[in-house]
Amino acid sequence: MDYGGHTALHCALQGPPAALAQSPERAVRALLNHGAVRVWPGALPKVLERWCASPRTIEVLMNTYSVMQLPEEAVDLVPPETLQKHQRFYSSLFALARQPRSLQHLSRCVLRAHLEGCLPYALPRLPLPPRLLRYLQLDFEDVLY
């Protein structure tokens, strides 16, 4: 945390729009996998509005919450051309707003919470199939469930 109270994740999400070319989703995922404090749920609409052109950034953030708390009007924060370009992702996002997440996702949240603080060291040491390990490490799927 810096002197202004900003975390590394907060600073990464405050980056300029030109940062889209630098794969911000990878930086956000790395920070979350190494114990970064998540974004306050009330700030998610602002993050959605700023990073809607990078659905993977939104995906990796949303996959750290067991419940998605987006207001109904959040769909208006995403420009129509972006909604159309990333239709599959945004359809899944807005379908889950205020709905329960899948048991698979909830299990991921519980395991990540249990391993909090040692996540980057503990996960690779668990005897897990590679696909499950990638899922727990917030691998991109381009859809939410």
Image (tube, rainbow, N blue to C red):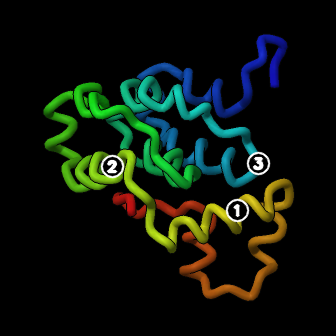
Q: Residue at x 71, y 31 (%)?
A: 8
Quadrant of the image occupied by residue 7: top right
Quadrant of the image occupied by residue 4: top right
Secondary structure found at label 2: helix
Viewer-nearest of labels 3 and 2? 2
Q: Earlier in the sequence, mark 3 or mark 2?
A: 3
Q: Nearer the viewer, residue 78 or 140?
A: 78
Quadrant of the image occupied by residue 31: top right
Secondary structure found at label 3: loop
Disc 1 and disc 3 in contact, CB within 8 angstroms: no
Marks 3/2: CA distance?
Answer: 24 Å
Q: Residue at x 60, y 43 (%)?
A: 27
- Kindly identify which residue carries mark 1: 112
Q: Quadrant of the C terminus?
A: bottom left
Q: Earlier in the sequence, mark 2 or mark 1?
A: 2
- Kindly identify which residue carries mark 3: 35
- Kindly identify which residue carries mark 2: 93
Q: Please, is residue 135 above or below residue 29 in the view?
A: below
Please give the label number shown on residue 16.
none
Q: Residue at x 39, y 46 (%)?
A: 98
Quick one: label 1, few (<14), some, or many (20+) residues within 10 Å? some
**What kind of residue is marked 2?**
Leu
Q: Residue at x 52, y 63 (%)?
A: 139
